[in-house]
């Protein structure tokens, strides 16, 4: 398999393994059809679909040849839609993860958006850690630029999460950073698992609707 594609595939499989592991844990603690697990399985599927595409493509390329621009573009597009799909699952799942818990404003923001308002409200109500909020805010900005600005960053910004730093440069293509979108999506999946734990810690035992 082509070396560069193998590196992307490894990232995607790692993202899948995080979601799968958390889904197994949730099933043991709650049930197999719990909204927490359904969300994590959907995230796992996004990573698996992307990894399968990269694996299939990588097997048909000479392992030691430089990628042509159109070949690189195929990988970038796969990463992009994995990232966008991951953010879409997370945003869609928030009302289901919260259920009937929290303030009316929180539930309204979770259902109707904007997602940025939901994140601010969720942090203020103690169900999202500041680190997870910052990551998802940054990721949402990236997602919006990918969808609405053809992947060109609207602003310059830097976001550090644990020991990883992500940089956006105003006017530059976000997709040009090889592997960045896969890394961001992986961290977003990890953050979703943390948010689930935050929700349980804050609201555990309360009716989720």
Image: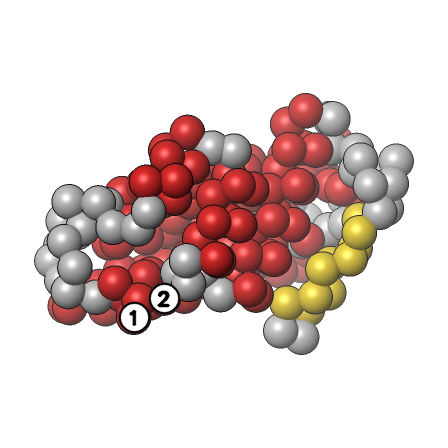
Q: Where's the N terminus, which quadrant?
A: bottom right
Number of labels in the image equals: 2
Q: Is residue 118 left or right of residue 27?
A: right
Name the spot of residue 40 as percent of width and height, x first: 32, 53
Residue at the outermost front position? 104
Say which element carries label 1: helix
Q: In the image, is residue 3 above or below residue 143?
A: below
Image marks 1 and 2: residues in contact by CB distance under 8 Å: yes
| Figure colour scheme | secondary structure
Name the spot of residue 162 as percent of width and height, x first: 62, 73
Q: Quadrant of residue 133?
A: bottom right
Q: Is residue 208 left or right of residue 159?
A: left
Name the spot of residue 172 as percent of width and height, x first: 86, 39
Residue at the outermost bottom position? 163
* Residue drawn at 36 percent across, 66 percent down: 198
Q: Quadrant of residue 9?
A: bottom right
Q: In the image, is residue 4 above or below residue 145?
A: below
**Nearest the camera: 122 or 134?**
122
Count residues near mark 2 (Cα–Cα under 10 Å), then give few for <14, some for 14-19, many for 20+: some
* Residue drawn at 68 percent across, 53 percent down: 180
**Nearest the camera: 97 or 68?**
97
Name the residue beneath numbered marker 1.
Answer: 201
**Nearest the camera: 127 or 190?**
127
Say which element carries label 2: helix
Count residues near mark 1 (Cα–Cα under 10 Å), then give few for <14, some for 14-19, many for 20+: few
* Residue drawn at 57 percent across, 65 percent down: 131
Name the residue beneath numbered marker 2.
Answer: 198
Label 1, label 2: how many angstroms apart (C-alpha)?
Answer: 5 Å
- Tell me if residue 37 can be seen: yes
């Amino acid at each position: 398999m082509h070396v560069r594609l193998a590196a992307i595939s490894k990232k995607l499989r790692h993202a899948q393994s995080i979601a799968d592991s958390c889904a197994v844990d949730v099933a043991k603690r709650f049930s197999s059809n719990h909204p927490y697990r359904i969300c994590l399985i959907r995230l796992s599927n996004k990573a698996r679909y992307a990894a399968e595409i990269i694996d299939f493509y990588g097997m048909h390329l000479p392992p030691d040849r430089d990628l042509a621009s159109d070949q690189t573009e195929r990988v970038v597009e796969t990463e992009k839609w994995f990232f966008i799909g991951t953010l879409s699952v997370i945003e869609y799942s928030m009302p289901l993860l919260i259920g009937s818990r929290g303030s009316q404003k929180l539930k309204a923001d979770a259902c109707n958006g904007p997602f940025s308002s939901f994140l601010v409200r969720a942090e203020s109500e103690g169900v999202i850690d500041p680190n997870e909020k910052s990551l998802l805010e940054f990721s949402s900005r990236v997602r919006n630029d990918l969808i609405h600005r053809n992947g060109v960053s609207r602003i310059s910004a830097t976001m550090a999460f644990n020991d990883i730093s992500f940089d956006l440069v105003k006017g530059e293509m976000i997709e040009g950073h090889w592997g960045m979108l896969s890394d961001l999506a992986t961290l977003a999946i990890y953050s979703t698992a943390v948010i689930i734990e935050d929700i349980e810690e804050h609201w555990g035992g309360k009716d989720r609707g």
